[in-house]
Image (cartoon, rainbow, N blue to C red):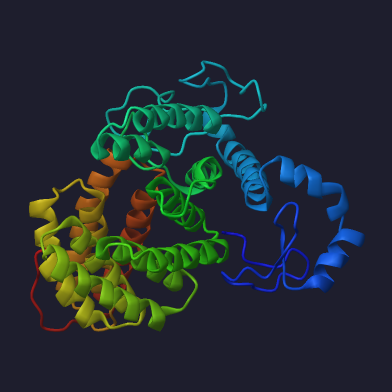
């Protein structure tokens, strides 16, 4: 269950069952709140409807999905004005009246001619991936095909880049409401829960993402999931702790995840590089810059060689390396110049791969402005420290 709070007083119930409505499974902290909800909270009017929609969890997911779709369509309205969905070829989705979205890199990158590419209704995207994955499951296609089709819940099939922000959030709710009824031990159920936590966090709903990720971790522990799956969940949870300002806690978890990835996969695996980036980010947030720089000096060349210059993990690694250079109060002129060169190069690649509105591209551009300002200030006061350059 993802619903972890009492429907009346919002007391955190954790993953324990608590008190549940016998008809629709709405959760309460005790009988007093349940009675109050029935008598004063309108539950007597909603109970049958909630049951009809599949119970409290399904009802909540359906409601959250509709809200997320409306938010995404509103946020994308200016970008999609006058356009039509590339799937159904209509401007408005007939069944729900929803508007269009575009939350990937389509139509926004260097060399992409049409701004229309990738514009769609969330419902059309959801129906398409549901159909494709259902076909793969029904015909018992191999795991690679199933994973590729599931990935369309979070990655655009046209530009092959992940959705982000409010569009990512809407698709994650679409995915969860589709598969939440499957058994806990079912792989698709676990993947849908994982995507919901990530999608909520991606849209900035960190408080809402926390119980989802904690529920996923508890489920994985209960089922005795493989080490690599546990590491992935812990990694996401640590990133969320950092977003919530729990930096010491995030660092402890990220250190364990990085160590675990090194032992399990070796230092030249994509997930190890990703773990190193996250670990360095936590170190930097706690102003442990020398440790972060040392880790990234080792990791960035591996990422560039193994993953390639345009891989999102490589760009993230180069970004955090540059950031540790210019935010450090002891940075030399050489450090600042190297940070600027690194961000300029990574920024050009991010613009080509993701487009100007993608979070990776905008964050690199913001950091580049800060690094240039730091260099101007340092050159203006005439100070410097002895130091060399590093290959970022």
- Which residue is at a point 74% across and 46% down the rendered structure image? 50
Question: Going by the image, does 231 lie left or right of 192?
Answer: left
Q: Quadrant of residue 379?
A: bottom left
Tell which of 36 and 99 is nearer to you.
36
User: Which quadrant of the figure has residue 108?
Assistant: top left
Residue drawn at 28 percent across, 68 percent down: 323
In the picture shown, does residue 163 fall above or below 107? below
Q: Give residue 91's position: percent from left, percent from top.
A: 58, 20
Query: How many labels sit on residues?
Result: 0
User: Where is residue 287 shown, x and y percent of the image?
Assistant: 32, 82
Q: Is residue 231 above or below residue 83?
A: below
Question: Residue sitting at 76 percent across and 73 percent down?
Answer: 30
Position of 79 with respect to 142 (left or right) is right
Q: Is residue 46 visible?
A: yes
Question: Is the C terminus in the top left, top right, bottom left or bottom right quadrant?
Answer: bottom left
Nearest to the observer: residue 366 or residue 57: 57
In the picture provided, is 138 more to the left or to the right than 330? Answer: right
């Amino acid at each position: 269950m993802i619903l972890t709070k009492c429907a009346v007083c919002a007391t955190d119930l954790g993953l324990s069952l608590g008190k549940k409505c016998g008809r629709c499974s709405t959760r309460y902290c005790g009988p007093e709140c349940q009675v109050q909800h029935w008598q004063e909270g309108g539950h007597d009017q909603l109970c049958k409807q909630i049951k009809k929609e599949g119970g409290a969890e399904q009802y909540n997911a359906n409601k959250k999905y509709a809200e997320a779709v409306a938010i995404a369509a509103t946020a994308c309205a200016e970008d999609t004005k006058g356009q039509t969905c590339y799937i159904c070829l209509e401007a408005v989705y007939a069944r729900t009246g929803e508007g269009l979205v575009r939350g990937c890199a389509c139509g926004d990158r260097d060399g992409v001619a049409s701004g229309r590419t990738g514009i769609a209704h969330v419902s059309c995207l959801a129906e398409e991936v549901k159909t494709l994955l259902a076909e793969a499951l029904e015909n018992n296609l191999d795991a690679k095909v199933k994973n590729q089709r599931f990935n369309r819940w979070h990655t655009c099939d046209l530009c092959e880049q992940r959705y982000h922000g409010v569009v990512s959030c809407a698709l994650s709710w679409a995915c969860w409401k589709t598969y939440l009824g499957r058994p806990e031990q079912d792989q698709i159920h676990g993947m849908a829960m994982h995507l919901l936590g990530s999608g909520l966090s991606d849209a900035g709903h960190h408080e809402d993402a926390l119980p989802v990720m904690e529920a996923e971790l508890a489920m994985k522990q209960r089922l005795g999931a493989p080490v690599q799956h546990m590491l992935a969940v812990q990694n996401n949870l640590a990133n969320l702790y950092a977003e919530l300002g729990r930096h010491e806690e995030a660092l402890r978890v990220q250190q364990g995840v990085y160590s675990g990835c090194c032992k399990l996969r070796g230092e030249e695996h994509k997930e190890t590089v990703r773990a190193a980036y996250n670990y360095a980010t936590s170190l930097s947030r706690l102003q442990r810059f020398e440790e972060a720089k040392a880790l990234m000096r080792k990791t960035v060349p591996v990422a560039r060689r193994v993953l390639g210059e345009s891989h999102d993990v490589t760009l993230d690694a180069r970004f955090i390396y540059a950031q540790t250079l210019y935010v450090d109060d002891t940075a030399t002129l050489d450090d600042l110049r190297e940070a600027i060169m690194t961000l300029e190069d990574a920024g050009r690649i991010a613009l080509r791969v993701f487009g100007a509105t993608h979070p990776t591209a905008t964050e690199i551009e913001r950091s580049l402005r800060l690094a240039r300002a730091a260099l101007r200030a340092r050159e203006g006061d005439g100070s410097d420290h002895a130091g060399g350059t590093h290959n970022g």
